[in-house]
Amino acid sequence: MTVTRFAPSPTGRLHLGHAFSAIRAHDFARERGGTFLLRIEDIDGTRSRPEHVETILRDLEWLGLGWDGEIVFQSQRLNLYEAALERLRAAGLLYPCFCTRADIAASASAPHRPEGALYPGTCRGIEAPDLTRPHCWRIDMKAHTTVADSLTFEDSARGIVFADPASHGDVVLARKDAPASYHLAVTIDDAAQGVTDIVRGEDLFTATYVHRLLQALLDLPVPLYHHHALLTGPDGQRLAKRHNAPTLATLREAGEDGRALADALRRGELPIGFETGKA
């Protein structure tokens, strides 16, 4: 049976981009007689807010999107993430990192990408690290070379894709201020919830490289992936909370018809000033 999910973070209000992705995941499951799940990714304790959870639920109902079963909250699943971290630590695949973002940005050997500097491995190999100091846990990409050579996944637009997790560097799997990173939590949860098809934005396509590695290391099933185009605003930038994208709550409170908006998005009709980017 087909199982999809929508997994927003309650760190702000949903915008049109979220609506577009939620509709795609919802309809993908419904058209196949499957299950559509709702998961709240609320492990960022410094930014997650209960009021945003309530707004998310109201927005989805306003759009006419119904979910199946109980809502899952990541904050109630911390034991699963810790168990995965312990397994990876026991296999010698993780190491503690004490670097700050400023330390990483200042490293001359760290090539810069749009999402920030690639971690240069400064803390890799430190003997007897002082774990009483604030630290995160990173995966050692050099320790899995035999696994990485055979990592593939299927994307509906691209076919069979060879994953390149090393291109992300030694990514964080447990943050200093959170018990798990997005990469670890989303991989564990998708497997635990039996998600068969992951429908999400094109901006997360290369993140699949890391998720595919974790699936291999933790013996988890590999779902099918469907990365869709992103919505962009009048300035050409993709819609995002940090860019102050117009929220669904604002439209709802202004008296807009949510179901009509959802149907328009299904037809590819966007409000004036918005466009669909390339997938």
Image (cartoon, rainbow, N blue to C red):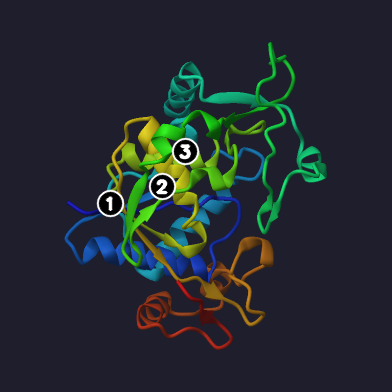
Task: Indicate the quadrant where residue 191 lies.
Answer: top left
Crowding near the residue tagged with mark 3, few <14, some 14–19, many ≥20 C-alpha atoms within 10 Å? many
Q: Is residue 186 above or below residue 256?
A: above
**Viewer-side label of 3, 1:** 3
The residue furthest bottom is 272
Say which residue label 2 marks.
Answer: 39
Give amino acid for label 1. Answer: Asp
Say the numbered circle drawn on residue 68.
Answer: 1
Residue position marked by numbered label 3 in the rendering: 185
- Above or below, 73 against 4 in this view is above
CA separation in Å, label 3 and label 1: 21 Å
Q: Residue 81 location in percent, x, y?
A: 46, 29
Q: Disc 2, disc 1: CB below 8 Å?
A: no
Tell me, yes or no, if residue 188 can be seen here: no
Q: Quadrant of residue 217?
A: top left
Q: Residue at x 66, y 55 (%)?
A: 115
Label 3 secondary element = helix
- Earlier sequence position, callout 3 versus callout 1: 1
Q: Earlier in the sequence, mark 2 or mark 3?
A: 2
Instruction: Please give left or right for residue 140 compared with residue 269 in the image.
Output: right
**Residue type pointed to by label 2:** Arg
